[in-house]
Amino acid sequence: MKRLNPAYLFVAPAFLLAAVFILWPIVQSGWMSLHDWTIGEDSHKWLGFGNYTELFGDSRFWNALKVTLIYAVFVVAGQVAIGLALAQWLRRTTWYTMLLRSAFFFPTIASLAVTGIIWKFLLDPQVGLVDGWLGKAGISAQAWLQDTHLALPALIVVGIWKNFGFSMIVLLAGVQGVRKELLEAATLDGAGAIARFRHVTLPALRPAILFTVVIGTVNALQLFDLTYVMTDGGPLFHTESIVMYLYQRGFVDFRLGYASAIAWVLFLIIIAVSVVQLRMLRYRDDD
Amino acid sequence: MTTELTSDLTSVPAGTPSWVVPVLRSARSVARVLAWAVLSIAALATVVPFLWMLGVAFRTPADLYADPSRIWPDHWTFAGFHAVFTQLPFLRLAVNSVVFAGGTTVLLLLIDSLCAYALARLRFRGQNLVFWTILLTLMVPFQVMLIPLFLTVFHLGWLNTFQGLIVPRSVSALGIFMLRQFFIKIPRELDEAAKMDGAGPLRIYWQIILPLARPALASLFVIQFMALWNDFLWPLVITSDTDMRTLPSALTLFSSTSGVDHAALMAGAAISLAPLAIAFLLAQRFFTEGIAATGIK
Amino acid sequence: MKTHVNVAAAAVAAAGLLAAAGCSSSSSSSPSGSGGSVVKLSVLTGFTGPDGPSYQALVSQFNASHPNIKVTMDIQPWDAIGQKLPSEWATGQGPDLATPNFDPGVIFTYIKTNSVLPLDSAVGAGDTQINSSAFPSSVTKAFTVDGHLYAVPANLASVALYYNKTMFTAAGITDAPKTSDEFVADVKKLTLGGANPTQYGISLADHQTIQMWPILQWMNGGDIVGADGCAAVNSAASVQALSTWAGLVQSDHVSPVGQTGADADTLFSAKKAAMELNGPWAADGFRKAGIDLGIAPVPVGSAGPVTVASTVPMMVAKNTKHKAEALEFLSWWTGKTAQASFSKQSGFPPARTDVTVSDPNTAVFAQALPNARLYLAGLPSSSQIDSDVYTPMLGQLTRGADAQKSADAAAKAINALTGCKS
């Protein structure tokens, strides 16, 4: 009798749960995207790819795509770069580094809704903290979230602020796991701190960097809560992300079929981006 | 405690003239002090928004509007906290949140680590398919899955139940991915040694891999617990019984288009944040241990 | 090993929890028993914020006076309701009654999906009936589709002019402006500080707010969508009003640009603006913020007194198990006693034209009701017009776009949405 590979038993619970509670709803939403779907209606008109062709010509969708991509690129780059630097500088564990690490991780803990509300107040041009302090430094107040040119950059900064602590913690586990012998060997060879970082630490961090980049990107591309609370997609759609637009069409206009089509296009984009990232960072290597 | 290399302070590049060395050392000291100062200021700047939030929780509306950018209250009040505790069935909400977030996270750690171990260590047919399928689940925004998921849970008869709340959320692709990356880095020699002692994959998983993965498990625990603790929409959709509500949904009670009770809102946010902060500080101990510390015996 | 034990213990605990939880489901509405047992009704509303307690108090009053019915009101944010209510009602779950959205236009969707009951059977002149003739006619009209009444007003409000008396005195103005011309003059006078004002004449909001700009158009005889369903936003009167006020914002800096309703309230509360157009809910908060508050009717323009009204529809689920009790609740809610009591408690005007208001602060809002118009009333595409066309148009105007061009573009988009063939 051929023995069942025990690996399947390890994988079964996760796979089963994912299939029933995540993949099946995704498939159902795909089905909805092929119809004109309003929840509660008795019958739903079949549209084939009608929603998708409409989407292709929808300028507001393309704007949302642009906004989302810009946001994702800058936030992921920012959070990983800052997280990496902090993980390296704070790798030793003393009471003080633990304190600093906690401070840096704190933004990750707050809920997105509360974060949005706080920052909306802080960025208010008349009564907010940011402009108040800038004013004391002699810089004139800016309407951060009301100015069409400043709103997206402000949002990006808040996005980085919210996430860099998470990247730092993930990369910290990796930095602390770098083999001491390799670092010692490099020092004996005369390598300075920067060289050691580049040639020993960084390569050893590849799995952790891969993880945080992919996860960061997947999250950033699904931007919703922060912009919903802070700008509601404004001013004049300059911060309207894809999921925001999807929400508008699906739950305000009640066109769930169209919203599902938007979601599926986003889904395909995220898959494409992740494949590229995983290939580039060579996820299969176990070294 | 990780042992660190002898500090950068004493290592100078080979061939430096001897008169340069003390200059280099003091320059490095100054640089280090500067670096710590910058880091400290950055840390303070990072938490200023929360300090402000805490301040608002104790301020009267008149005080808040007189100078919204000030961090500390001029006139202290407990009205915000009072509103939170009197308008909400606070204990019930907190218990529900702990059960939901805690129960789901524990189950999730188990399920995720089992799967991650198989993906990192065991060879089996279809492992790429499994990895990609799991990863795919992260890529669809929740808003879109919401209604089909609601229907699925409805058809299972799990609406308004704890299992309906917990089970669908007990697997996380983020967790599987993160643990897999971590498990990959654990030296295979440890596995080999255990195998030679006759251990099967389950024992290796339980006795070797899991203990070594404490930093990653601790990180994942904090991250997942916090995400579930803050999750507003999911419990709202699955439960219609107000007895089963969790903390975040109750906090939305204090803001609306017709006005915001800032003190109550921020008081509620602060209260909701406190357990997470505590959980993180407690979990900090686990972050300090690297797998390299075990060495190879 | 320590971790070993901890994880095992946790897993056992989790399993135990699930097993125990399996028996702990609670049903949302109990079966209606015969004679003597209490009928349970559930109502879902979006009245978060400082308003909430007033509505809860009304529910408690109902429960006290109706021993055989027990109503529980669940309060959730509007967007959460929008995300779960349709599927709940579609699967036979969900509350017996609900206010699906603050926008009256939402009733069309729920009628289309056959999720709500027509209320005609309960309409009449009696005390236990829905006296729809006592509602303002604009409200009844907005809630009547194809000749059937589908909703009652859960509340009713109008917008008045809040002003800061201290700032007015400092600027030498004795009374609130009464005419459109005085309005424009005062707003300029009260803006201090040049291009970066330290004090704004008025705090205008253009999104996520009860709409203020329609008032400015209506004052001049303009409108957004005419009675025929065709766009009126580019009529001469509308464009004149829009360009006047956009000019005031752009060149005279009388108000910040791009504010939400909450931003506008904050600005006024922080004593950085002298006036704000807002509803009765704001009065309490402004007083708590320490403002010497004045409330006056909206200034009168060439088209006569006018202001914007807002009302929230409350509807009955089609698959409610307690139709009679739900209708009884609606009848009571819109009855004279309840409305008088609610008005006293919340400061809102009553949702009935035949209840007099004694409180002078509430009186301002109640007196404005006969001339109050609903924003985009009776249009199935109202939410789309608001978010896709009108609000962006305001955003462009206040940032310097040409009024006629923007209005024409908006008119075209509106006609596409309403199906007007002009």
Image: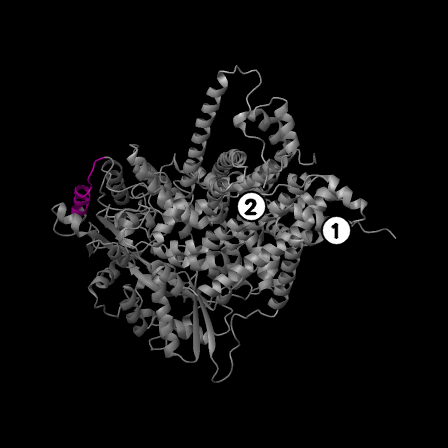
| Residue that badge 2 annotates | A263
Q: Residues within 10 Å of mark 1 (few under 14, many from 20)?
A: few
Residue at the far bottom in the pictured view: C35
Q: Chain of mark 1?
A: B
Q: CA distance from mark 1 to mark 2?
A: 42 Å
User: Which secondary structure class fits the magenta region best?
Assistant: helix
Q: Residue at x 51, y 78 (%)?
A: C32
Q: Amino acid at mark 1?
A: Arg
Q: Decide: marks 1, 2 in contact (CB < 8 A)? A: no
Instruction: Give x and y (percent) for residue B30.
Output: 43, 27
Q: Is residue B30 above or below residue B19?
A: below
Q: Is residue C168 magenta?
A: no
Instruction: Give x and y (percent) for residue A64.
Output: 48, 39
- Depth-wise, is mark 1 or mark 2 nearer the camera? 1
Q: Residue at x 20, y 37 (%)?
A: C193
Q: Secondary structure at mark 2?
A: helix
Q: Secondary structure at mark 1?
A: helix
Q: Which is more toward the observer, B45 or C308?
A: B45
Q: How is the image coloured?
A: one colour
Q: Is residue B8 above or below residue B232?
A: above
| Residue that badge 1 annotates | B203
Q: Amino acid at mark 2?
A: Ala
Q: Is residue A36 above or below residue C141?
A: above
Q: Quadrant of residue C293?
A: bottom left
Q: Which is more toward the observer, C227 or B264?
A: B264
Asked if residue B215 can be seen in this view, the reply is: yes
Instruction: Give x and y (percent) for residue B85.
Output: 40, 63
- Specify the segment rendered in magenta: C181-194
Image check: B196 left or right of B119?
right
Instruction: Give x and y (percent) for residue B130.
Output: 70, 46
Location of the C terminus of chain C (image quadrant)? top left
